[in-house]
Amino acid sequence: QVQLVESGGGLVQPGGSLRLSCAASTSIFGFTVMGWYRQAPGKEREEVAIVTPGSSTRYADSVKGRFTISRDNSKSTVYLQMNDLKPDDTAVYYCNAYDIRATVRADYWGQGTQVTVSS
């Protein structure tokens, strides 16, 4: 069982920065792939970035060079540093986790945090 709690969303002007945090309550954090997804109104949820237990990363093309995902295993926390934010980044951002060892993938989700980019 994995519980995820996001924080750090808010309202920011275009070109600004925000850092999202996701704290995981689990004893298996060291085996989890952690990710950030987002969902804008009227659109499907999309993957933004993921980080593996070994800290390999993957980014959506739309955020490459602007967003950075990282994890602190000692704090069971994953971060998403978002720079040069654009109005198209406006969405609810969700933290995701799954156990990389599992035969059948089971996804865990946070409650979401709103990010609004507007002048």
Image (tube, rainbow, N blue to C red):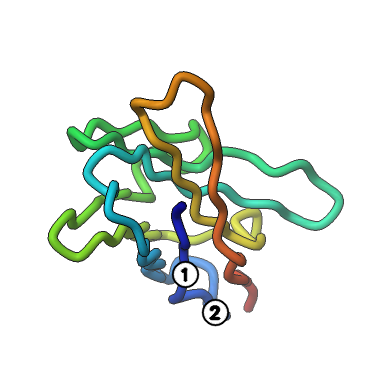
Position of residue 41 relative to residue 60, above or below, is below
Residue furthest top in the image: 103
Q: Residues within 10 Å of mark 2 (few under 14, many from 20)?
A: some
Q: Position of residue 109 (x, y in %)?
A: 56, 53
Nearer to me, 74 or 119: 74
- Callout 1: SS: strand
Seen at 36% across and 64% down, the residue is 25
Q: Earlier in the sequence, mark 2 or mark 1?
A: 1
Q: Which numbered circle lies on residue 22? A: none
Q: Residue furthest left?
A: 74
- In which quarter of the view is residue 110 placed? bottom right
For badge 1, the amino acid type reads Val
Please tell me the numbered disc located at residue 10.
2
Of residues 90 and 26, the one drawn nearer to the viewer in this rendering: 26
Q: CA distance from mark 2 to mark 1?
A: 15 Å
Compared with 87, 101 (above or below) is above
Which kind of residue does numbered mark 2 sit on? Gly
Q: Quadrant of residue 24?
A: bottom left
Residues 88 and 110: in front is 110
Residue 78 in picture, x, y percent from top left = 31, 57
Residue where numbered disc 1 is placed: 5
Q: Residue 26 vs residue 96: left or right? A: left
